[in-house]
Image (cartoon, rainbow, N blue to C red):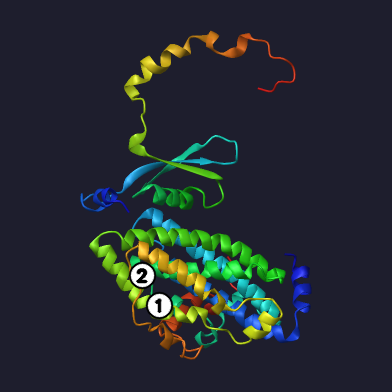
Amino acid sequence: MEASAIQKAISDLPKDCRTPLTALLLRLGDDRLILGHRLSEWCGHAPILEEDIALANIALDHIGQSEALLRLAGLVEGNGRSEDDLAFLRDAKDFRCCRMVQLPKGDFAFTILRQFLFSTYSACVWEQMQKSPWLPFAGIAQKSLKEAMYHVRHSQEWTLRLGDGIEESHNRAQEALSSLWPYTAELFRESEGTAELQKAGIACSLSAVIASWRERVEALLKEATLTIPEDDTALFLSNIPTAQHTEHLGHLLAEMQVLPRAHPGAQW
Amino acid sequence: MTAASKENNCKTGETQWDLWEVFTQPKTGAPHEHAGSLHAPDREMALQNARDVYSRRGEAVSIWVVPAREISATLPDDSGPFFEPGNDKVYRHPQFYSVPRGIKL
């Protein structure tokens, strides 16, 4: 979209929507920025060359999505912050990403299971958001959906092969699923101001996609002979305050932000 | 996953997956051309790897993957009997026909 058309769309927004929309865009953007960074840590370390390239591609897709989302967040916020300012000059407490994406990359099974749970969620979210009549957002959703569909395919195929593979791969995949599962509830937590956004028809509520996510995830995990943990510990996490991150986020940001902070405005 | 492919990939002690040859089609209607090769445990993963290795910059609209061992190839020793007899038979080229105007070669 042309910059002028985006500005027009922003000025046409109902007044009470700007703050919640900024929050939603930051949340969606931060999830993808942090997950993209975690995936990029595989670069040069994946089990095989082809997978190294695949994970780096997927990392770049996530960072590309976050760039678009954070840019739009900065414009809607209206304080002149660019996507780079938002990515590199915010402190951990101002990030809105969920805890699942902050966790260290773990072994290959952990990375794949996280990609599967998150990408399936992402595809469900974009399927809904692409219907938004607010075009700057719908445009990002349409482009991101195509990428997410490939990420789902990639992680599904791996989940099947690890889960229904040999004993070692099955055990590792099951362990990854069991440790990730409690973090999934947070994906569907409502952002503040969701009601205003829904009323204005700009965005659906994130909790609305939980049923379709659960259905897809359950079907694939069953095929992969993996078991969802029985005690649904997922619920306890949804009670932790939003801005309380894992201890891993600060370390990740220190590495991700060091260059732009040490050399403000650096170009290459 | 089939028992056979598990057997094939995990229990033989082989550390390398099968080799696959990749053919990409740059645009609809164009022939698929050999792009290179890669390792993958099965067809679906070979397609995914091919997508990531050979078309991540949008080079292809279609991809074929073929197990390298399924390809029959001529040997260097065959080059005499296979190819040389064609070299001195100019009448096998179509240059003795007049080409109607308006036809582009």
Q: In this view, does B97 lie above or below A201?
A: above
Q: Which of A258 and A109 is in front in this view?
A: A109
Chain holding disc 2: A
Q: Position of residue A116 (x, y in %)?
A: 43, 66
Disc 2 on helix, strand or loop? helix
Q: In this view, does A29 lie above or below B63?
A: below
- The answer to which of marks 2 and 1 sits earlier in the sequence is 1
Q: Position of residue B105 (x, y in %)?
A: 65, 22
Q: Position of residue A225 (x, y in %)?
A: 32, 64
Q: In this view, does A236 lie above or below A25?
A: below
The kind of residue tagged 1 is: Leu
In this rendering, position of residue A118 left or right of residue A175: right
Disc 1 on helix, strand or loop? loop
Asked if labels 1 and 2 touch by Cβ distance under 8 angstroms, the answer is yes
Kindly identify the residue that appears in the image at 36 percent across and 60 percent down. Answer: A160
Q: Which residue lies under the disc numbered 1? A: A103
Q: Which of marks 2 and 1 is in front?
A: 2
Q: Which residue lies under the disc numbered 2? A: A110
Q: Position of residue B41 (x, y in %)?
A: 33, 50
Q: Is residue B97 visible?
A: yes
The kind of residue tagged 2 is: Phe
- Which quadrant does the C terminus of chain A fall into? bottom right
Kindly identify the residue that appears in the image at 23 percent across and 63 percent down. Answer: A167
Dot label at residue B27: none
**Marks 2 and 1, Cα distance to the nearest angstrom?**
10 Å
